[in-house]
């Protein structure tokens, strides 16, 4: 299949081309150019998308969410993280059967795609049976989106699993799913939080993930109370404890990183780790403000023998689950990330639009192994409709993407060269029927969990 997108503004790695084209062949970007495409390219295109008054950018990476929480929206208002988890989320999660997970995840994926994400890291918290997990992977495979499923686990506290069961299920997922769906599906190790994981199982699961070239993705330093728990138990702060266990590296994701000490920031930089910033969840759950601008400007120590100029801490962006956001719109997430840092650093130079877009694209790509808008890369692209009252007139395309665009402006979404959303419609899916089914199912789930 060949596809030509023409007359769109292009967000390239170093500049914005006001009008240009992208030619896709065999799932990959075969040509990018400014101005009008050559006649030969037009003649060889099986499909042509007109990009007039539209902006083409690399697919966004939603680097942290919990898709099953699509059935748990609206419980986070005026509750602390620990109250919200114990009295609502864990109860609802425990009551979910595989069909609930399938439907919640499908709806969550559709919402995430509509929010601009071509790649989603799903920290999957309900791996109660093989089926509970496989339905998530099957839904992503069917919808055609790129998914990293970080298999969550806890071997301490309520509903703890045995270390052997965790290892066996992770191994099974690596064997059956890692690299599936033409490489669109990846498995990751997903310890839930430091205070619910033992040192030994953290070590063993990270070792297994590394054997498969996979990442380890864990909530870290989200609230002060959690940092205090690890400190009391181990004498170390969470990132320090993980460093002492040998878990940090370029394959490690610290999700949230709100309450980080100077020493922890230094450790993350030395190991070139990723911090996934989820601004909406941090605000809603009153967790605090992650020091994102500091993370982005922190340099490694001199002896760290790495090339110059490369960013030391990779800061990606995530929406977090629909229970603590309460949406999956990556444009909103970009905007909140920019607002929050500018308001708290009092530095008007903080978070320029290019940097924010890089967090949602390039940094996410490094975190999740996603392609970018480059010749030879797999074609994961978003075409935004800029012909809208809340966007026009446009002074600066990048600023308009961060400050004006919304998920509802996603006109076309392409993954692996395949068009998944066109003219703002998700192809191959009866979205209204799905929503109606999910509405009923979520009501029954709340009743079963004893929450009204
Ligand atoms: Zn989370």
Image (spheres, helix red, strand yellow):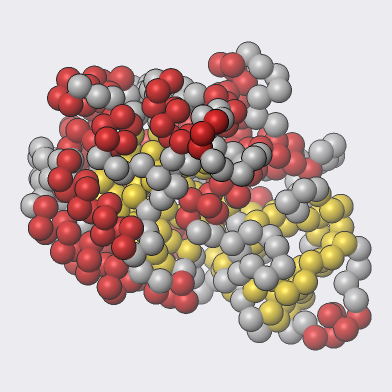
Q: Is residue 144 above or below residue 277?
A: below
Q: Image check: 119 left or right of 125?
A: right
Residue displayed at 60% across by 57% down: 59
Q: Where's residue 145, x and y in %?
A: 49, 65
Residue displayed at 59% across by 16% down: 345
Residue farthest to the top, as pictured: 346
Front residue of 382/181: it is 181
Q: Which quarter of the rendering shows the N terminus?
A: bottom right
Residue displayed at 64% across by 67% down: 377
Front residue of 339/105: it is 339
Q: Is residue 192 above or below residue 211?
A: above
Q: Is residue 427 above or below residue 105?
A: below
Q: Where's residue 116, x and y in %?
A: 58, 53
Q: Where's residue 85, x and y in %?
A: 23, 34
Q: Where's residue 274, x and y in %?
A: 46, 42
Q: Which quarter of the rendering shows the C terminus?
A: top left
């Amino acid at each position: 299949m060949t596809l030509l997108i023409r007359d769109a503004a292009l967000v390239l790695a170093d500049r914005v081309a006001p009008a240009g084209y992208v030619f896709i062949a065999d799932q990959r970007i075969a040509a990018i150019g400014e101005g009008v495409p050559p006649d030969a390219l037009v003649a060889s295109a099986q499909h042509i998308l007109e990009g007039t008054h539209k902006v083409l950018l690399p697919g966004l990476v939603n680097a942290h969410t919990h898709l099953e929480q699509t059935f748990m929206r609206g419980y986070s208002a005026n509750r602390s993280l620990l109250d919200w988890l114990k009295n609502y989320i864990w109860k609802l999660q425990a009551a979910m059967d595989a069909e609930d997970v399938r439907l919640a995840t499908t709806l969550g994926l559709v919402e995430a795609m509509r929010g601009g994400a071509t790649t989603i890291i799903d920290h999957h918290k309900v791996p109660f049976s093989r089926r509970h997990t496989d339905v998530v992977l099957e839904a992503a495979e069917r919808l055609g989106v790129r998914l990293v499923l970080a298999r969550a686990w806890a071997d301490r506290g309520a509903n703890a699993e045995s270390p052997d069961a965790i290892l066996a299920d992770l191994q099974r997922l690596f064997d059956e799913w890692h690299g599936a769906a033409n490489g669109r599906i990846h498995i990751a190790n997903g310890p839930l939080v430091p205070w619910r994981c033992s040192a030994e199982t953290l070590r063993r699961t990270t070792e297994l993930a590394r054997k498969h070239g996979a990442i380890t993705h864990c909530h870290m330093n989200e609230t002060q109370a959690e940092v205090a728990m690890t400190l009391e138990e181990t004498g170390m702060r969470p990132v320090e404890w993980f460093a002492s266990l040998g878990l940090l590296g370029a394959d490690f994701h610290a999700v949230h990183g709100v309450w980080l000490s100077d020493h922890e920031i230094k450790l993350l930089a030395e190991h070139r780790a990723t911090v996934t910033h989820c601004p909406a969840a941090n605000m809603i759950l009153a967790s605090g403000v992650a020091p994102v601008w500091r993370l982005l400007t922190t340099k490694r120590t001199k002896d760290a023998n790495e090339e110059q100029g490369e960013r030391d801490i990779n800061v990606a962006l995530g929406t977090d689950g629909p229970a603590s956001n309460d949406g999956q719109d990556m444009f909103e997430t970009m905007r909140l990330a920019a607002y929050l840092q500018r308001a708290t650093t009092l530095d008007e130079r903080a978070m320029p639009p290019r940097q924010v877009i890089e967090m949602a694209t390039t940094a996410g790509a490094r975190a999740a192994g996603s392609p970018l808008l480059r010749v030879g890369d797999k074609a994961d692209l978003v075409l935004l409709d800029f012909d809208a009252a809340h966007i026009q007139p446009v002074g600066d395309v990048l600023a308009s993407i961060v400050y004006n665009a919304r998920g509802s402006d996603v006109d076309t979404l392409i993954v692996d060269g395949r068009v998944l959303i066109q003219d703002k419609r998700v192809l191959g899916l009866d979205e209204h029927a799905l929503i109606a089914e999910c509405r009923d199912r979520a009501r029954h789930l709340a009743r079963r969990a004893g929450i009204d």
